[in-house]
Image (cartoon, rainbow, N blue to C red):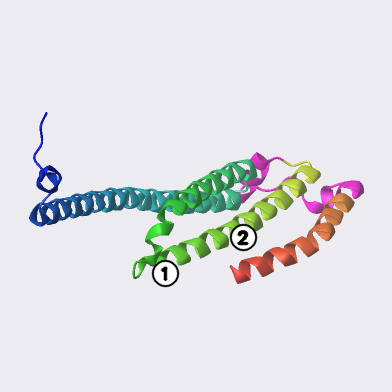
Amino acid sequence: MSHSETFLHESEPKPDQLRHRLRKNIRRFLVLLLVAVALYGAFAAVVGLQVVSELADGRDHLFEARSQAIELSFSDARDEIHAATESFDKAERRLVFLKPVSALPGIGQVLTDTTALFYTSAQIIDSFSSLIDISYDILQLSGLSEEYLQDVQAGLEPTVTFDDLSSDTKRMILERLSASADDLELLFEQLSVA
């Protein structure tokens, strides 16, 4: 194929073509960036809603654990505490996906507050769980059942009092309470800080 002497000069793109191509590439990049930001925004919104949902579930489980403990149903209270812990753990794991938006005004403070909420919730759960464990141990040492205590709380006249327990049982209960005194003091300190 024969070429003219100016072949290489003629095949070079003209400055107008270069500018047009550059603008086109910049527009493509900006559109892709906008789509990526929109997709992440949608993802962050869904994750944010999931975090809020898990926090609400954890709170509900804590309130239910408290109700179960008041009703002296310690095994059910333990189950509720376990469920609350799982809910808070799920929410905390999802919170990591929202770290990139923490630089946005207002959102960073919300994420910091939410992280503090996880820390406080963990302290409350640990304290409450320890109280339930101590209560359950004392119940087991006394030889009474949860059902019996629930009946007494509901108004049934108690057939067994502390005075009716054997000396060994009384001693074991008092030893458990004595051993738990430091733990209880620490728990009250943790709850007052939380």
Frontmost residue, 169 versus 34: 34
Q: Residue at x 36, y 53 (%)?
A: 48
- Judge the density around disc 2: few (<14), some (14-19), many (≥20) Cα neighbours within 10 Å: some
Where's the N terminus, which quadrant? top left
Kind of residue indicated by mark 1: Gln
Please tell me whether residue 125 is drawn above or below residue 8 in the rendered image: below
Name the residue furthest right. 168
Frontmost residue, 69 versus 8: 8
Would you identify the image quadrant in which residue 82 lies? top right
Q: CA distance from mark 1 to mark 2?
A: 21 Å
The residue that label 2 is drawn on is 123
- Judge the density around disc 1: few (<14), some (14-19), many (≥20) Cα neighbours within 10 Å: few
Residue 5 in magenta stretch = no
The residue that label 1 is drawn on is 109
Frontmost residue, 118 versus 169: 118
Frontmost residue, 102 versus 175: 102
Q: Secondary structure at mark 1?
A: helix
Name the residue furthest top. 1
Asked whether the beta carbons under mark 1 and mark 2 sit within 8 Å of each other, the answer is no
Horizontally, is 192 left or right of 84 in the view?
right
The part of the chain drawn in magenta is 145-169
Say whether residue 154 is visible. Answer: no
Residue 146 in magenta stretch = yes
Please tell me whether residue 104 is drawn above or below residue 11 in the rendered image: below
Give residue 65's position: percent from left, percent from top.
Answer: 55, 49
Say whether residue 68 is visible. Answer: yes
